[in-house]
Image (cartoon, rainbow, N blue to C red):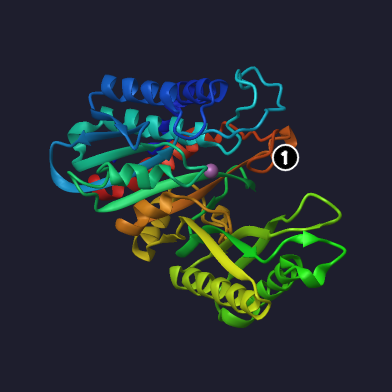
């Protein structure tokens, strides 16, 4: 049996070097050209069969074992965010306005660490590991782009695994939940059309502003009145545009926002109610309502069998008392699309170190994590993979 902790420790310097290099050279959604070429070069060097340009800048690589068995998908995301970094580390972003503020630099480095580890033990693998390095997680588009380009075919994985470094959990802790772990995310806009004119003579206009105001308030009844109290959801109206002047009644008002949910059925109820409420109020006011919906991600749902198996493996690496109860987060994650098609498990590894000031939240300009999480995560992810291909 492989000692995953020792093997991952041996890769510490290498994984940290990859992470720092990616951190210094952040690339945002679908621009991960440099990152993906470093990933592809390393995987080729390790002897994997590598395909590039999957979902524009994604990389798929297969590590084939020495006999037949299951195919395990290991997924990492490569993209950074359009944020100006405010840290002063030696590995600070070299690109103004771009920053790895979510830890995807770490995820990519960890998956390369796992590839290194298994390349060494290739002869012990029964089946194969399919590494998927995806672009554009932050805009919720990379996973679907890769799936469209065949990332889940030839061969089709039997199980999908991924992780997120999590800066609200202290280093050394771990969260592996069953069922929904991250929300699905959709955005919407409603355009109310009336009849514009002078603000001093409203009776000759059809003012869409009070109509929009009624709709905004009424949308707040969706979660409280149309969703079961056993389910969770969020509906937030965040954007409003009317006229730009004090004395003009606009022809149109557009309101927009986002909604989050842990079941696709709940998403569908929310969309249906937004349409019904806005159409009803608009019609009663002699206005019309037009809609735009964008369903970015679906919920990330862990398969209980896959989670249970992983928890057993993780006990050997992280003591039971440090396995924390992971509340589902209303953040979105497009790993959901791989896990929708292939049963899987997405887990959270605590990466914060408050004493060292490494506990800013994700997407914060001072986000950074304790790099001790990197070898630990390599060991964890590798041990979960090994359960399928080295059993
Ligand atoms: Ni992220």
Q: Check mark 1 vs ligand 1: CB closer than 8 Å? yes or no.
A: no
Q: Residue furthest left?
A: 67
Residue 225 seen in render:
yes
Q: Name which residue lies at 54% across and 22% down.
A: 20
Q: Nearer the viewer, residue 331 or 322?
A: 331
In-front residue for pair 76/385: 76
| 167 displayed left or right of 386 | right
- x, y (%) of residue 79? 49, 34
The quadrant of the image that shows the N terminus is: top left
Q: Residues within 10 Å of mark 1 (few under 14, many from 20)?
A: some
Q: Can you say whether 203 is above or below 183 in the image?
A: below
Q: Nearer the viewer, residue 1 or 161?
A: 161
In the picture provided, is 46 more to the left or to the right than 360?
left
Q: Which of these two is toward me, 260 or 310?
A: 260
Dot 1 falls on a residue whose secondary structure is helix
Q: Position of residue 11 (x, y in %)?
A: 42, 25
**Which residue shows up at 42% across the image and 32% down it?**
8
Q: Which residue is mark 1?
A: 354
Where residue 385 sits, quadrant-wise, is top left
Residue 63 placement: quadrant: top left
Q: State whether residue 28 is above or below residue 258.
A: above
Residue 238 in percent (x, y) is at 69, 56
């Amino acid at each position: 049996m492989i000692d995953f902790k020792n093997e991952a420790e041996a890769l510490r310097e290498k994984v940290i070097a990859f992470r720092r290099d990616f951190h210094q050279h952040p690339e945002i959604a679908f621009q991960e050209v440099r990152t993906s070429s470093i990933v592809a070069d390393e995987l080729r060097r390790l002897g994997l069969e590598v395909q590039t340009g999957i979902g524009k800048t994604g990389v798929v690589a297969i590590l084939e074992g020495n006999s037949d068995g299951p195919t395990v998908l290991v997924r990492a995301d490569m993209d950074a965010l359009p944020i100006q970094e405010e840290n002063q580390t030696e590995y600070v972003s070299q690109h103004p306005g771009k920053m790895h503020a979510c830890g995807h630099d770490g995820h990519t480095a960890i998956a390369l660490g796992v590839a290194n580890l298994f390349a060494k033990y290739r002869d012990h693998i029964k089946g194969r590991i399919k590494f998927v390095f995806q672009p554009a997680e932050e805009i919720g588009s990379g996973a679907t782009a890769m799936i469209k380009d065949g990332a889940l075919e030839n061969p089709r994985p039997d199980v999908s695994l991924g992780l997120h470094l999590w800066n609200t959990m202290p280093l050394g802790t771990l969260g592996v939940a069953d069922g929904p772990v991250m929300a699905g995310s959709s955005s919407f806009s409603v355009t109310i059309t009336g009849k514009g004119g002078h603000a001093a003579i409203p009776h000759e206009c059809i003012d869409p502003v009070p109509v929009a105001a009624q709709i905004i308030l009424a949308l707040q009844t969706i979660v409280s009145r149309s969703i079961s109290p056993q389910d969770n959801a969020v509906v937030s109206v965040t954007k409003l545009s009317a006229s730009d002047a004090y004395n003009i009644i606009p022809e149109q008002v557009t309101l927009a926002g986002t909604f989050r949910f842990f079941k696709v059925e709940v998403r569908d109820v929310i969309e249906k109610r937004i349409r019904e409420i806005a159409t009803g109020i608009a019609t009663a006011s002699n206005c019309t309502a037009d809609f735009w919906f964008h369903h970015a991600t679906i919920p990330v749902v862990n398969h209980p069998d896959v989670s249970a198996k992983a928890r057993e493996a993780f006990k050997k690496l992280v003591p039971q008392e440090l396995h924390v109860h992971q509340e589902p987060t209303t953040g979105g994650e497009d790993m959901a699309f791989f896990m929708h098609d292939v049963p899987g498990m997405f887990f959270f590894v605590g990466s914060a170190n408050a004493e060292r000031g490494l506990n800013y939240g994700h997407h914060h300009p001072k986000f950074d994590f304790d790099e001790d999480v990197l070898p630990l995560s390599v060991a964890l992810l590798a041990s979960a993979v090994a359960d399928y291909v080295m059993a």
